[in-house]
Image (tube, rainbow, N blue to C red):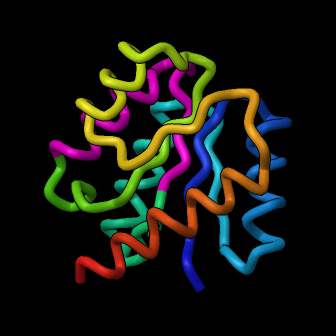
Amino acid sequence: MKTVLVVDDDANIRELIAWKLTQAGFETLAAPDGHAGLSAATTATSEGRAPDLIVLDWMMPKMTGIEVARALRENPATSNIPVILLTSNAEEADVEQGLAAGVDDYIAKPFSPREMLARVQAVLARCEART
Protein backbone atom coordinates (compact mmCIF):
# COMPACT_ATOMS: atom_id res chain seq x y z
CA MET A 1 0.00 0.00 0.00
CA LYS A 2 1.35 3.42 -0.97
CA THR A 3 1.56 6.15 1.66
CA VAL A 4 0.83 9.81 0.99
CA LEU A 5 1.70 12.59 3.44
CA VAL A 6 -0.83 15.44 3.26
CA VAL A 7 0.47 18.77 4.56
CA ASP A 8 -2.07 21.60 4.73
CA ASP A 9 -2.98 24.09 7.44
CA ASP A 10 -6.66 23.96 6.47
CA ALA A 11 -8.10 20.97 8.35
CA ASN A 12 -11.05 20.66 5.94
CA ILE A 13 -8.80 20.39 2.90
CA ARG A 14 -6.42 18.04 4.69
CA GLU A 15 -9.33 15.77 5.65
CA LEU A 16 -10.88 15.90 2.16
CA ILE A 17 -7.60 14.89 0.51
CA ALA A 18 -6.95 12.15 3.07
CA TRP A 19 -10.50 10.82 2.65
CA LYS A 20 -10.23 10.71 -1.16
CA LEU A 21 -6.83 9.01 -1.01
CA THR A 22 -8.02 6.49 1.58
CA GLN A 23 -11.02 5.68 -0.62
CA ALA A 24 -8.57 4.94 -3.43
CA GLY A 25 -6.55 2.53 -1.27
CA PHE A 26 -3.74 4.78 -0.05
CA GLU A 27 -2.51 5.04 3.51
CA THR A 28 -2.37 8.68 4.58
CA LEU A 29 -0.36 10.67 7.07
CA ALA A 30 -1.25 14.28 7.83
CA ALA A 31 0.47 17.39 9.13
CA PRO A 32 -1.04 20.81 9.92
CA ASP A 33 1.85 23.05 8.86
CA GLY A 34 5.11 23.09 6.94
CA HIS A 35 7.38 22.46 9.91
CA ALA A 36 5.30 19.49 11.08
CA GLY A 37 5.16 18.17 7.49
CA LEU A 38 8.94 18.30 7.09
CA SER A 39 9.36 16.65 10.47
CA ALA A 40 6.85 13.90 9.60
CA ALA A 41 8.61 13.20 6.29
CA THR A 42 12.09 13.07 7.79
CA THR A 43 11.01 11.02 10.82
CA ALA A 44 9.11 8.49 8.72
CA THR A 45 12.05 8.24 6.32
CA SER A 46 14.56 7.68 9.14
CA GLU A 47 12.29 4.91 10.46
CA GLY A 48 12.34 3.18 7.06
CA ARG A 49 8.77 4.09 6.09
CA ALA A 50 9.20 7.13 3.87
CA PRO A 51 6.01 8.45 2.29
CA ASP A 52 5.67 7.51 -1.36
CA LEU A 53 4.42 11.02 -2.16
CA ILE A 54 3.72 14.32 -0.41
CA VAL A 55 0.78 16.63 -1.19
CA LEU A 56 1.96 20.00 0.07
CA ASP A 57 0.11 23.29 0.46
CA TRP A 58 2.09 26.42 -0.41
CA MET A 59 0.77 29.00 2.06
CA MET A 60 1.19 27.67 5.60
CA PRO A 61 2.43 28.93 8.95
CA LYS A 62 5.91 28.13 10.27
CA MET A 63 7.27 27.04 6.85
CA THR A 64 5.81 27.56 3.41
CA GLY A 65 5.38 24.67 1.04
CA ILE A 66 8.19 26.08 -1.09
CA GLU A 67 10.52 26.07 1.92
CA VAL A 68 9.50 22.50 2.75
CA ALA A 69 10.03 21.36 -0.85
CA ARG A 70 13.51 22.89 -0.90
CA ALA A 71 14.40 21.29 2.44
CA LEU A 72 13.17 17.89 1.20
CA ARG A 73 15.27 18.19 -1.97
CA GLU A 74 18.38 19.23 -0.01
CA ASN A 75 18.19 16.19 2.29
CA PRO A 76 19.56 13.05 0.56
CA ALA A 77 17.17 10.88 2.59
CA THR A 78 14.05 12.70 1.29
CA SER A 79 15.27 14.13 -2.01
CA ASN A 80 13.54 11.51 -4.15
CA ILE A 81 10.09 11.69 -2.54
CA PRO A 82 7.71 13.12 -5.17
CA VAL A 83 5.90 16.30 -4.17
CA ILE A 84 2.68 17.80 -5.50
CA LEU A 85 2.21 21.45 -4.57
CA LEU A 86 -1.40 22.44 -3.87
CA THR A 87 -2.04 26.18 -3.89
CA SER A 88 -4.17 29.14 -4.80
CA ASN A 89 -1.03 30.79 -6.23
CA ALA A 90 -1.65 29.86 -9.85
CA GLU A 91 0.11 32.57 -11.82
CA GLU A 92 2.79 31.45 -14.27
CA ALA A 93 5.56 32.87 -12.05
CA ASP A 94 4.18 30.91 -9.09
CA VAL A 95 4.20 27.67 -11.06
CA GLU A 96 7.78 28.37 -12.15
CA GLN A 97 8.81 29.03 -8.55
CA GLY A 98 7.22 25.78 -7.39
CA LEU A 99 8.85 23.73 -10.11
CA ALA A 100 12.21 25.42 -9.44
CA ALA A 101 11.87 24.34 -5.79
CA GLY A 102 11.70 20.74 -7.00
CA VAL A 103 8.02 19.88 -6.94
CA ASP A 104 6.84 17.24 -9.38
CA ASP A 105 3.39 18.61 -10.10
CA TYR A 106 1.23 21.59 -9.27
CA ILE A 107 -2.50 21.72 -8.49
CA ALA A 108 -4.32 25.06 -8.30
CA LYS A 109 -7.06 25.67 -5.72
CA PRO A 110 -9.94 25.31 -5.94
CA PHE A 111 -9.35 21.77 -7.13
CA SER A 112 -11.32 18.71 -8.00
CA PRO A 113 -10.66 15.78 -5.63
CA ARG A 114 -10.84 13.46 -8.65
CA GLU A 115 -8.21 15.50 -10.49
CA MET A 116 -6.01 15.50 -7.38
CA LEU A 117 -6.29 11.71 -7.16
CA ALA A 118 -5.48 11.35 -10.85
CA ARG A 119 -2.40 13.55 -10.45
CA VAL A 120 -1.23 11.57 -7.43
CA GLN A 121 -1.58 8.33 -9.39
CA ALA A 122 0.17 9.83 -12.45
CA VAL A 123 3.14 11.14 -10.45
CA LEU A 124 3.52 7.80 -8.68
CA ALA A 125 3.33 5.94 -12.01
CA ARG A 126 6.03 8.18 -13.50
CA CYS A 127 8.26 7.58 -10.49
CA GLU A 128 7.77 3.83 -10.68
CA ALA A 129 8.59 3.86 -14.40
CA ARG A 130 11.95 5.51 -13.63
CA THR A 131 12.99 2.75 -11.23
Q: Height in image: 49 above or below 90?
A: below
- Residue 27 in the image: x percent, y percent? 66, 73
Residue 71: image quadrant is top left
Start-end of magenta stretch: 54-74
Viewer-closest of 38 and 80: 80
Please state the total of marks drawn on the protein image: 0
Which quadrant would the C terminus be assigned to in this image?
Answer: bottom left
Regarding residue 61, the answer to whether it shows in the image is: no
Question: Residue at horizontal 80%, vertical 61%?
Answer: 20
- Residue 114 in the image: x percent, y percent? 77, 56
- Residue 61 in the image: x percent, y percent? 55, 17
Residue 120: image quadrant is bottom right
Question: Residue at horizontal 49%, vertical 38%?
Answer: 106
- Residue 125 in the image: x percent, y percent? 44, 75
Q: Magenta segment: does it hold 62?
A: yes
Residue 35 shown left or right of residue 48 in the figure: right
Viewer-closest of 73 and 44: 73
Q: Height in image: 110 above or below 111?
A: above
Q: Height in image: 82 above or below 110?
A: below
Viewer-closest of 41 and 53: 53
Residue 91 shown left or right of residue 20 in the figure: left
Q: Magenta segment: does it hold 67?
A: yes
Question: Residue at horizontal 67%, vertical 51%?
Answer: 116
Residue 76: image quadrant is bottom left
Which quadrant would the N terminus be assigned to in this image?
Answer: bottom right
Q: Height in image: 117 above or below 11?
A: below
Regarding residue 8, the answer to whether it shows in the image is: yes
Question: Residue at horizontal 35%, vertical 42%?
Answer: 103
Viewer-closest of 124 and 18: 124
Point out the residue furthest to the front here. 92
